[in-house]
Image (spheres, grey):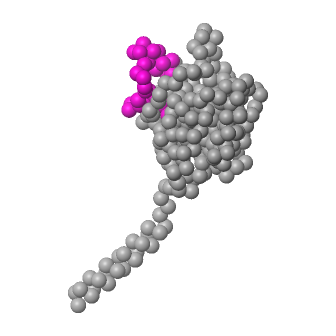
């Protein structure tokens, strides 16, 4: 008799548990459609390796992934190389644009994605300083947020080869100066691997105007204005030869002036958004 009662109670309990579990929605990447934009300026010697590495890696993942190469003002055979790789991977697409600039290329890539069925939209540098498995960390981190960015200066990050102490210190100071002038709490604004939700991209894209290397800074500032929750994830990053970013007095001046320029440009947007929404605790996080 006692066994029958115990069995009946157990059966009822399990039935209730199964019903409860059936109504719980767990975060899942299985149905996610991701677009990874790769801005490319004269990358004929590096783009093939990058595309094949990313395509082969993501083909084994559950997400449906599209790669969009945005060739910007290329004078070499970058587009021809992309077309060659495209024959082996139908999820590789490209735009061939004449105006130049990384920021311009990313914005055009963002605009292209907005009428497509993407859940997450990101970008990564063409030199594969960020390898596919480390970009994937951003995708997993964005499940419960509005996006994620890779960081070379967050605790746990690894950079190879190791940078000289003064260069590392200079990079950290430079990032601190940039973000403090805009009031954003990230340790690394410039690492070329970021991903955002489609809603975030839809919100910030119309206001993006930086065509050069300050575009990353503007994106993060716009995310702050729209109160988006963006995570900063320590990454593994490999310094690559052949970089197009040449440090010069002109570039330094451009970066130093960019926070003021960005704040002035979006002053009206900031006021409009502050009127529409009550003030909330900052949603820009790092870990």
* Residue 46 position within the rendered picture, expressed as x and y whole percent measured from the top left: 59, 30
Q: Observer-nearest residue: 32 or 274?
A: 32
Magenta stretch bounds = 150-176
- Residue farthest top in this picture: 249
- Does the image show residue 129? yes
Residue 267 in the image, given as x and y percentages of width and height: 67, 27
For image coordinates 61% across by 41% down, the residue present is: 36
Q: Nearer the viewer, residue 2 or 97?
A: 97
* Magenta run includes residue 163: yes
Instruction: Tell me what residue is drawn at x 72 percent, y 42 percent.
Output: 112
Give the residue at the far right of this rendering: 98
Q: Please tell me which residue is depicted at 32% across the width and 84% down the height of the picture.
A: 8
Q: In which quadrant of the rendered view does residue 199 lie? A: top right
Residue 110 horizontal side relative to residue 26, left or right = right
User: Is residue 189 shown to the viewer in this render?
Assistant: no
Q: Is residue 24 above or below residue 267?
A: below
Q: Image height check: is 173 above or below 204?
A: above
Q: Position of residue 50 (x, y in %)?
A: 57, 35
Q: Quadrant of residue 243?
A: top right
On the rendered image, what quadrant is the C terminus found in? top left
């Amino acid at each position: 008799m006692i066994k029958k009662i115990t069995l009946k109670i157990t059966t009822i309990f399990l039935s209730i548990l199964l019903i409860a579990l059936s109504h719980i929605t767990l975060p899942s990447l299985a149905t996610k459609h991701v677009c990874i934009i790769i801005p490319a300026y004269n990358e004929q010697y590096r783009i093939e390796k990058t595309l094949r590495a990313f395509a082969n890696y993501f083909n084994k993942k559950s997400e449906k992934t599209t790669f969009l190469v945005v060739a910007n003002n290329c004078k070499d055979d970058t587009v021809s190389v992309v077309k060659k790789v495209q024959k082996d991977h139908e999820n590789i697409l490209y735009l061939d644009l004449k105006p130049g600039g990384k920021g311009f290329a990313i914005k055009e890539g963002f605009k292209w994605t907005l009428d497509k069925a993407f859940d997450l939209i990101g970008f990564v540098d063409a030199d594969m300083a960020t390898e596919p498995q480390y970009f994937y960390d951003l995708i997993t981190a964005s499940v419960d947020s509005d996006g994620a960015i890779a960081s070379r200066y967050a605790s746990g990050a690894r950079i190879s080869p190791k940078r000289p102490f003064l260069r590392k210190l200079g990079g950290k100071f430079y990032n601190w100066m940039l973000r403090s002038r805009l009031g954003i709490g990230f340790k690394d604004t410039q690492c070329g691997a970021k991903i955002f939700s489609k809603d975030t991209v839809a919100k910030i894209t119309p206001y993006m105007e930086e065509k050069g290397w300050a575009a990353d800074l503007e994106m993060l500032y716009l995310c702050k204005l729209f109160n988006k929750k963006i995570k900063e994830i320590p990454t593994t990053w490999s310094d690559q030869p052949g970089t197009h970013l040449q440090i010069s007095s002109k570039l330094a001046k451009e970066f130093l002036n960019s926070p003021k320029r960005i704040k002035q440009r979006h002053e009206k947007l900031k006021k409009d958004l502050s009127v529409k929404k009550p003030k909330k605790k900052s949603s820009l996080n790092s870990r």
